[in-house]
Amino acid sequence: HWGYGKEDGPSAWHRHYPVAKGSRQSPIDIIPDEARRDSSLGPIFLKYDRCTSLSIANNGHSVVVEFDDSDDRSVIQGGPLDNPYRLKQFHFHWGGKGCEGSEHTVAGVGYASELHLVHWNAVKYTTYEDAATAPDGLAVLGIFLEQGDDHRWLHTITDVLYMVKFKGSATNFKGFNPKCLLPSNLHYWTYLGSLTTPPLHESVIWIVLKEPIVVSEKQLGMFRILQFSGEEEDQRMRMENNFRPPQPLKERILKKRC
Ligand SMILES: COc1cc(C[n+]2ccc3cc(OS(N)(=O)=O)ccc3c2)cc(OC)c1OC
Ligand SMILES: [Zn+2]
C-alpha cells in the first residue's frame, strides 16, 4: 500500500499508479509572474451556508471531514467552473516543522500546511467515484496555512483530533461550516491537475487561493498527535509530512483572474 515513507512515498507511487508520471499531475510550484490573465475567469462563489458536515475521520493519510452531498446545499461555482460542484470533504496536508507541509509552493516557497476542500461535478456525473475519474469531475479549493497567531475557529477541529488519533477512527462532526476557514479575499490561481494522493486521477480543476490563513504553531502541532498507524499496530507512526512535492507543469498554463 502507499504512504509518505521512504519505501512507499511519492517517489515510489508510480510503480502501482503509473499516472504519477502523467501530463497533468498535482501539486505544482506556482510562479505568480508566469500566471496568464484570463478575462473569461470570473470570481468564485462559495455557498456553504446550510452546511452539512457529518463526520471527521483518520483515513491513515490525513484527517478528513465528510459532508452530506445528497443535494446542492454546499457548492462552489464560478471561476473556471461551468456549473456548481458539490462539497464532499475537506482534509489537510502538513509538515513536521514550520517551513514545509503544503503541497503547492509559491515561487519555490512552501507553507506550513494546506487545506483541500474537495467538490464534485454532480451535474455531469451521478456519483463522486465516477466524477473522481473524469477530466472535469472534481474541483479542489486549496488554501495555504501560514504559521502565526492562533486561528479563531481552527480549534473546533484541533479540539477533536484526539478522538481520531488512529487510522480507521471516526466520530460525529455535525454543523461545521468551513466558511470560517476562508481568508478575507478569494483571489485565486487555477490550472488542470490531479489528485495528489493515489489513485492520482487526472480529474481535478485546481483553484488555489493566493491569501493564506494564519494558524499557530500550537494548533499545527495538534495535527501531529494523529497517527498514520492503526490502534492495534505496535509501530507508532506520527502523522506528519503527508504532502506530495511539486510535479512538472509540462504543457499546462497556470491562469489567474484579471
Ligand atoms: C472515498 O471513496 C472514494 C474516493 C475516490 C476518489 N478519491 C480518491 C482520493 C482522493 C484524494 C484526494 O486528495 S487531494 N489531495 O487530491 O485533494 C481528494 C479526493 C480524492 C478522491 C474514489 C473512489 O473509488 C474510485 C472511492 O471509493 C472507494
Ligand atoms: Zn489534499
Image: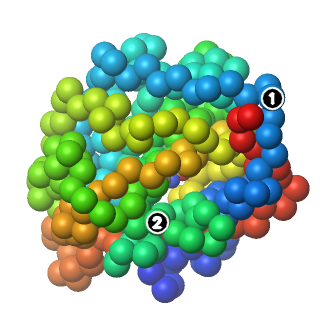
Q: Crowdedness of circle 2 by 10 Å Cα count: few (<14), some, many (20+)?
A: many
Q: From where the camera sits, is residue 125 visible?
A: no
| Residue on which disc 2 sits | 111
Residue shown at 57% from the left, 22% from the top? 77
Question: Residue 39, labelled with which disc?
Answer: 1
Q: Nearer the viewer, mark 1 or mark 2?
A: 1
| Residue toward you, 63 or 170 | 63
Determine the image quadrant of residue 129: top right
Whether ligand 2 has any atom under 8 Å from the Cβ at mark 2 is answered as: no
x and y percentages locating residue 26 in the rendered image: 65, 57
Q: Is residue 56 above or below residue 229?
A: above
Q: Identify the secondary structure beneath mark 2.
A: loop
The amino acid at mark 1 is Ser
Rounded to the nearest angstrom, the CA distance separating label 1 from label 2 is 29 Å
The C terminus: image quadrant: top right
* In the image: residue 256, left or right of residue 86: right
x and y percentages locating residue 103 in the rendered image: 53, 63
Q: Furthest residue to the right?
A: 251
Residue shown at 34% from the left, 41% from the top? 181
In this rendering, the count of numbered labels is: 2
